[in-house]
Image (cartoon, rainbow, N blue to C red):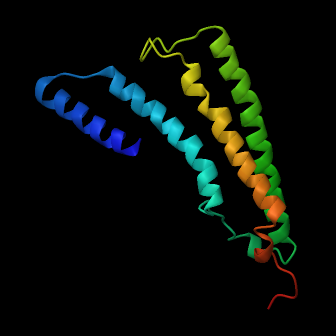
Amino acid sequence: MLLFQVVSVTIDVTLRYFWDISYSWITALNEWSLVYIAFLGAGWLEREGGHTRDESLVKYFGRWAKPFSYWAGAALGIAICVFLVWFGALVTWNKYENGVYDFFKIQAVPIAAVYVIIPFGSALWLIQLLRQLRAGRHSAELPTGPQP
């Protein structure tokens, strides 16, 4: 998808600059592929440990803050993923049932085909969060004894 984005935008900009030709479907596909990349990449990035943490304030609150922030962050992440799966599925099903199309971009594409990645990708991310929680992946990072 990234390769498609680079090539298609380059072609579109070149055509627009030299020949004043632009294809609206290129913009639409690039916008939709950004949504697909974000929601498919989130679970993978979680599995690879690529999500970042900011512990700049946590270290000033003592030993209790790191485990608390871990569990609070895990709970918040799981809650958000559950909400995205549930609400994303409702919206996607509604758009599918009503036969809604994206009339502003590519009129032949049902918008449910674009929206379906939101609950699907969020479910993958949720599964990964739950797997990590179950395996205690981050437990080695939590303080267990007196800290210097």
Q: Examine the rendered structure and indicate whether residue 71 appears above or below residue 104.
A: below
- Residue under the point 64% across and 50% down: 43
Q: Is residue 32 left or right of residue 62?
A: left
The residue furthest top is 98
- Residue under the point 73% across and 34% down: 85
The residue furthest bottom is 148
The residue furthest left is 18
- Residue under the point 40% across and 33% down: 30
Q: Quadrant of residue 39?
A: top right
How many marks on residues?
Answer: 0
In percent of width and height, residue 76 lies at: 79, 50
- Residue under the point 69% across and 69% down: 55
Q: Is residue 23 left or right of residue 103?
A: left
Between residues 14 and 99, which one lies in front from this camera angle?
99
Q: Quadrant of residue 131?
A: bottom right
Between residues 73 and 130, which one lies in front from this camera angle?
130
| Placement of the N terminus among the 4 image quadrants | top left
In percent of width and height, residue 48 lies at: 61, 62
In percent of width and height, residue 104 lies at: 44, 14
